[in-house]
Each structure stands twice: as C-alpha cells, then as structure tokens.
Amino acid sequence: MLSRRIAYFLIVVMLMLSAATTVSAATRRTRTRRVHRGRHVRRVVWNPMFRGSHELLVRQNEEIDRLELPRIADDDELLGLIGSEQLVPLSESQALIIASNLTETRRYCRSWLRDFLQDFSEAYYEEFKRPIQVNSLVRTAEQQKKLRRHNRNAAPQEGETASTHMTGMTVDISKRGLTRKQHKWIEQYFLPLKEIGLIDPIEERRQPVFHVTVFGRYADYREAEREPEERSPETRQGSSE
C-alpha cells in the first residue's frame, strides 16, 4: 500500500513538472514573438524626403494670395473658371492615367500644372514604360468640407492652411505599387524642381500619394528649357557667328 502511494505521488510530481515546463516554453515563445514584432516595427521608420508641415502649407497659401488665385467655392464657380479657360482639362495618354472615380469636372487644373504633369509622366514612362496615375486634381470648398468629415488628414477648406486643391494648382499622384527604384527616381525628379521653387511636393503617410503643388513660374521655366531644342540649326549657326 505504501509503495503504491509513493508511486502515485511521484507520478503527480512528474505531471506537474511537465506542465510547468510546457507553460514556461510557451511563455518564452510568446515573449520571443513580441520581441521580434517589436524589432520589426522599429525598423519601419517614416523618414520621407518630402515631409509636410504647417509652415509649408502657410507659405503655399501666402503665395496663392500673392498670385490672387481664388479658392473655388462651389460647382458654379468651378464651371465659370472652366468656361473662361482659367482651368484646362487634363487628358489621359500612354504615360498618364486618371483615377476612374474622378468625375469630368474634377479633371481640370491650371495650365502650368498640366504642363508639369505632361513633362513628368513622359519622363517617367520613358524610364519605366508604365504610366503614372493622377488621383485628385481640382476641388471646391464644398467638396473639401465633405472630405474632412471622413478624412481628418485632409486640409481645411479655409484659413491659413487651406487646401491648395481648391486653386487647381495641386495634384495627388499615386505611389501605390512603386518599386524602390521608381520611388527613388520620382524623388530625384522632384528635388531640383523643389530647390528652385517651382514645386512643393509632400509624400503623404496616411494616403499612398505624392501631393504636389506646382507654381505658375513653372510655365516660364518650361519655355526656357524648351527654347534651345526648338531653335533651328540655321538659327544656332547664325548666333555662333
């Protein structure tokens, strides 16, 4: 009888030790997964070349005021600017596509923004043989107000940091699906234009887009860049004499 009790006792002890070992191993695995997940999160650092800021939005709106560009209030004002050709249509091409959810009246912008998009998309297509996608162009204050209701990241429709989309001089360019090489190429394309004050790009974090504001002086820059190409050989020869 005594030997049976001892044997029973030993079995109970062994089962308890086995259970404790299993729990300890499971705990270690859980902690390891947490550590690994933590390390993985720490490696993902948001450090874009073109970061947005309050000061940047204020400066853009000051430039808009200097140019005396209107913030488009509603569809009636938008249609008036389209009719007077102060806003021009953006057309699709093999190098540029427009998001299907943009209605016809939202596919307009300032002429210098259209010029920028044509130049940028053609250069990108020549490099990668794929088009860029435009996700957003002109908006009205009414539209911006509605957008703010479900997207708190959207700029306000009024004030010193009001959305520049309401002037028709800003575009959202999709960055969804970009490779590292394509992303780097876009940064290097934007950088010199930003440094000479022709564009203000922002890489957004919550939305997969480059938000790019293009200033009116881009038209003069483009004309100056193209002028040497358009001069005839005879003109170049005459000027050299």
Image: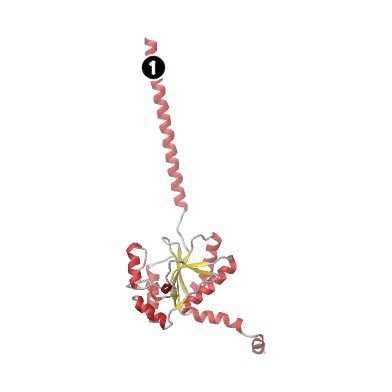
Q: Find residue 97 and report its horizontal and vertical position in percent.
A: 50, 68
Q: Is residue 66 visible?
A: no
| Residue furthest to the top | 1
Q: Quadrant of residue 73?
A: bottom left
Report the front residue among 118 and 103.
103
Locate the C terminus and report the quarter of the image it occupies.
Answer: bottom right
Q: Is residue 184 visible?
A: yes
Residue occupying the point 43% across, 63% down: 204
Q: Find residue 147 and report its horizontal and vertical position in percent.
A: 35, 66
Q: In screen coordinates, is 225 left or right of 103?
A: right
Q: Find residue 68 and report its horizontal and vertical position in percent.
A: 38, 81
Q: Quadrant of residue 224?
A: bottom right
Locate the N terminus and report the quarter of the image it occupies.
Answer: top left
**Colour setting:** secondary structure
Near mark 1 (Cα within 10 A), the count class, few <14, some 14-19 or many ≥20, is few
Residue occupying the point 50% across, 82% down: 220
Q: Find residue 237 and report its horizontal and vertical position in percent.
A: 67, 87
Q: Amino acid at mark 1?
A: Tyr
- As helix, strand or loop, the secondary structure at mark 1 comes to helix
Residue carrying label 1: 8
Residue occupying the point 39% across, 12% down: 4
In the rendered view, tell whether residue 82 sits above or below residue 191.
below
Report the front residue among 139 and 175.
139
In the rendered view, tell whether residue 71 sits above or below residue 234.
above
Residue occupying the point 34% across, 62% down: 150
Label count reads 1
